[in-house]
Amino acid sequence: MATERHETWADDISQLDSQALQVLRAEGRLTAQALLLASVERVNASGVNAVATLNPEAWAMAEASDHRQRAGRLLSPLDGIPLLVKDNINTGDQMPTTAGALALAGCRAPADAALVRRLRRAGVVLLGKANLTEWANWMAHHMPNGYSSVGGQVMNPHGPGLWDVGGSSSGSGAAVAAGLATLAVGTETSGSILSPASSNGIVGVKPTVGLISRRGIAPISWSQDTAGPMTRTVEDAARLLEVLAGRDRGDQATWAAPPVPSYTAGLARDALVGRRLGVPRRGYWECLSGSRRAAAEQALAAAEKLGATLVDVDLPTWDDMPGLEVLRYEFKPALNAYLARRPEVPTHSLAEVIRFNRAHAATALAHGQAVLLASEGTRGDLTEQAYWAARRDDLRCSRTEGIDRALAAEQLDALVFVGAMGAGIAAKAGYPSVTVPAGATAEGEPLGLTFTGTAWSEAHLLAMAFAYEQGTQARLVPKLPR
């Protein structure tokens, strides 16, 4: 009978947001422990391979939250809510932090990442670690989204084996869409939150670089890396962002961040009324075809119906910028510094990771390691003139002649893209984006509409995304086997 009860809970609550779950708890109809059991049962039954490892300490965390609930002393609106962190984010507990790499398999980080400390202070239940694309998709050319040597292949719950799951925060996106966890934290260097959020039909927030500390996260790029919320609703994304954001003396990028506002306070159903949204068709929207284009145009029409004015704008395209050169140069010194702070791992530099992979090629190199080799070929101290030239050109194209110019010239409130199509220019600028479910193609592939703005504009982007979400109710719930 107990098992049947838990399955019923899983069916009833798997798609609820944190606010609805807290109402059930306040009414005495749900406990954090029952919510945790339901999540674990969904993980084991889902078949999407989104979770790398479950947290053996999760039960104690849920039990402590129930004690706080009974005493009327919840630590935050997210106290007791199950959350997954991507498996490149350190947790100083019994869970390994592997970045999906065999070289780190089974290795436990010595301390929590800065953002994990914030999560613990908010009382969330750390359900476990989410699978990801190995090394956050900075390892090999044509690495499948959601694949790693440690975790295998993550599946899109809307069509396992049919639709791309997105990368590299694929496990985070699939798990939230499938109702395995209410919340997840992903990371992005260029598209790794926006892509799986759009592909799995959920909300993803890629914040301004420096809004959330990166200390304790396996890196790619000091100039582009960030963590961010992945949730089913914009309101939950805003709640989670309020927990994650804040300055950290261990991450200099956060020192320039303004005080964290209440992102939930600014959410309004009419936030699109009178807003001017830039639509960069050349090199972006014009690349769409078939039913994806038709669905995207419907998404734009919905924004217009909700009160927005659409303005065609011109932006630099990927061909106008120096590709991934900045990442190629920044990865080696960033990874070497990260591995030096993990004494428990067998590899302490990029060179050692490459040698380890060669020694275990049958299992570690299913798709090669060409990208790792390219980064290892740099000096590793960021002294190359080519690096500084690429960084200068990235900022010029993405900011001065890109997002900032377009916003100012047309007096725009934001730019809008389909899914992660604009992720590259926003990533190079270090600017924020919020993607929100916008329905699906005629074949059933989920589609997201992404709002992008200038630095520290998260509150405005979330408000517009909330208005779009509430006005369209476009999120689709995947049908998984029971």
Image: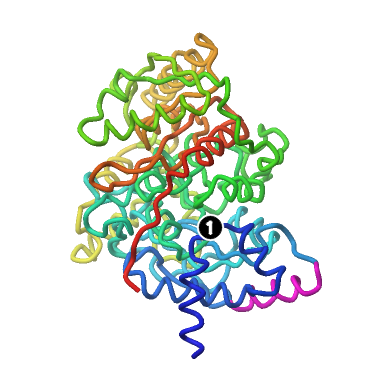
Query: Is 347 drawn above or below residue 316 in the view shown?
Result: below
Quadrant in the picture for the C terminus: bottom left
> What kind of residue is marked 1?
Leu
Residue 464, magenta (yes or no):
no
Res. 180 visible in picture: yes
Relative placement, left or right, of 245 versus 450 is right
Look at the numbered disc 1 and give the secondary structure of its residue: strand
Identify the residue shown where x is 49% and y is 18%. Answer: 309
Identify the residue shown where x is 60% and y is 67%. Answer: 125
Relative placement, left or right, of 259 versus 381 is right
- Whole-percent x and y of residue 313? 40, 14
For the view shown, which residue lies furthest in the front direction? 305
For the view shown, which residue lies furthest in the bottom direction? 1
- Whole-percent x and y of residue 311? 44, 15
At label 1, counting other C-alpha atoms closer than 10 Å, the crowd grade (few under 14, some 14-19, many 20 or more) is many
Q: Nearer the viewer, residue 230 or 323?
A: 230
Residue at the spot of label 1: 183
Q: Nearer the viewer, residue 395 or 410?
A: 410
Which stretch is magenta? 59-72
Relative placement, left or right, of 173 versus 85 is left
Q: Nearer the viewer, residue 327 or 403?
A: 403
Residue 69, magenta (yes or no):
yes
Query: Is 12 drawn above or below residue 60 in the view shown?
Result: above
- Whole-percent x and y of residue 98? 42, 62
Identify the residue shown where x is 51% and y is 83%. Answer: 5
The secondary structure making up most of the magenta span is helix
- Whole-percent x and y of residue 262? 71, 41
Identify the residue shown where x is 69% and y is 59%. Answer: 122
